Amino acid sequence: MRELLILTVVIGLIGSCNLYNSNTMKTYKSNDAHSYAIQEEAYVKHLDISLEVNFDLKSIKGEVIYDIVADTFAQKILFDTRDLNIHGAFILDKDHWQKVAFNMGLEDNTFGQSLSIPINSQTQKVKISYTTKQDAAALQWLTKEQTAGGDYPFLFTQSQAILARTWLPCQDSPGIRMTYTAKVKVPDYLMAVMSATNVRKKSKDGVYHFKMEQPIPSYLMALAVGDLVFDTIGPRTAVYAEAELIDKAVYEFGNMEKMLESAEALYGPYKWDRYDVIVLPPSFPFGGMENPRMTFLTPTIISGDRSLTSLIAHELAHSWSGNLVTNATWDDFWLNEGFTVYFERRIMESIKGKEYAEMLALLGYQDLEKTLEAMGDKNRDTHLKLNLDGRDPDDGLTDIAYEKGYFFIRALEDYHGRKKWDSFLRQYFEENAFKTMNTEEFCSYLKTNLSMSDEDWTKVRCEEWIYGPGIPDKNIRPDSDRFTQVDNLMLHWFENGDLGNLIKSSQHWSTHEWLHFLRHLPKDISSEQLISLDMAFGLTKCSNSEKAFAWYIQTIEFGYEAAEPAIEAFLISVGRRKFLTPLYASLIQHGKKEFALKIYKQARPMYHAVSKETMDELLGLTDFS
């Protein structure tokens, strides 16, 4: 997932089959603090699920059958649930399903309730029947008016980090992997897709069958239902989207097959058969979600010039770092995201050159600096290895896991040399494929397979990177000649008032150069200069979401009220949390809270629960009547 939880920051500113055979799967004896499952007693290895999607009731009716592995002395198996009505539990006794009494634990607002089902050492299958509640947090039910086509409703799920439990009872821990099959019934005018094998056209009866043969953790379970069409990019890549968006998406993502080939050249064969994407409605709360075989994407990256597709590279990279080798717990989240950011930038370097990748790295460093400034560089949440016990793991979705993780990995590459580091990473992904990894095991693997002595370990300052706050090496800031040219052009314009050179040079700028430019507008810029910029470049009416966002942030800070109608329209039409949180926060910070509340009360019904929860806290709201 290429997205960050910026609430902490902005509040601070405001104030082969054998490869995945179940016998080779690693399970952890230590329990996950964010799951009720007791893995040493019993864990799941396969799921067969039957779902019926009801748009009128805004509910899913489900029946799940789990193949389980139980310890000799096991008397129960525990599942995670939240926002679910459990109707019955059964165990397979010989050839017959036997109904058993189940027990629900105390309810917690974040973690939900445990579901305890009695078993014995001979139990191999457990069945659960249930329905989801209307407010199930993973599910977003969209009306036809909230879609691009405007004719039919839409449903999508978002399971990461611990929201899979809100649409199916499961052992909702990244440390437990399972294969699955599914049967999904939807209205016959809609198509269903999942993080599994998928069809390419609508079924006449609305029934769809899916299979995921590679074991995945629950947070990678995903479902989307809508008026979808399919189009091909390459031999292993394709796009699903509403008909109104499909042509734009196919053009925008035209480099996907090339990205896949570049990734394989770096770190080994792609092990998920196909890499397809689906463009979701704009309320999707993230840039992308790396659901295997079917990445979920925001439409905000469709800019018409392929300038925002590094996000595709990021989600594709997760097919190795995250999906193939998975963080054992959410305290180890940096193992997913730090490696993925590094891999993303290596893919982009192979396609667009080193300077392009360096621009991405420098923008990331700027983001990291802001995060550390807001959180405080002594804050324990700035460690790579986190301690999220008792907290929603969503709290760990900050620039720390992504960018600090990236720069630590880059420090390792710098120390060992790229050739040796690439060889190590290729081995790491191959030897640990379809397994989980925690931080301590990674450190041991790193020392052994890179032959790192204690002296090497100290020179790279590994202990400080992983278990210490802030950035241990202040000399890691990347350089970008293209950004330096941007700075010089800005200085010339600001000092001489001549936009000519800027207008001429910016015609060849990437989105990244624009972001650098907009982020660094002089603090003493005048209203007249803002107006001249806007008139020259049409920034307030910009259709590139990243450029528009960067401009809107600056206009709020500088009091450029001419942009407020565009900001309002943007916040009402886009549900991506990366944009929402800083914009609402900046409005509050600069005396525009009433304006922010006015917009939010209108926009809130369009936002996914993930975004609502963050904005509710930010705006201090509890009553939405």
Image: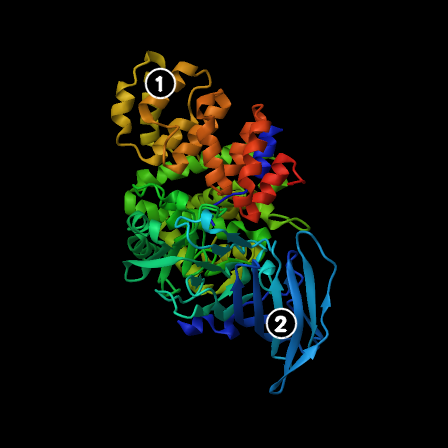
Q: Amino acid at mark 2?
A: Ile
Q: Quadrant of residue 45?
A: bottom right
In the image, residue 25 sits, relative to residue 226, either above or below, namely: below
Say which element carries label 1: helix
Q: Is residue 96 left or right of residue 338?
A: right
Say which element carries label 2: strand
Q: Residue furthest bottom?
A: 94
Q: Position of residue 533 (x, y in %)?
A: 36, 21
Label at residue 532 = 1
- Mark sitting earlier along the chain (1/2): 2
Q: Quadrant of the C terminus?
A: top right
**Which residue is at the front of the view, 507 or 416?**
507
Q: Position of residue 345 (x, y in %)?
A: 38, 45
**Which residue is at the front of the view, 50 or 474?**
50
Q: Position of residue 557 (x, y in %)?
A: 50, 23
Residue drawn at point x = 29 percent, y = 41 percent: 305
* Residue that numbered label 2 is attached to: 128
Q: Mark 2 Cα within 10 Å, few/some/many (few <14, many 20+)?
A: many
Query: In this orientation, does residue 453 appear?
Result: no
Q: Position of residue 257 (x, y in %)?
A: 30, 56
Q: Quadrant of residue 411?
A: top left
Query: In this orientation, does residue 568 appear?
Result: yes
Q: Is residue 430 left or right of residue 386?
A: left
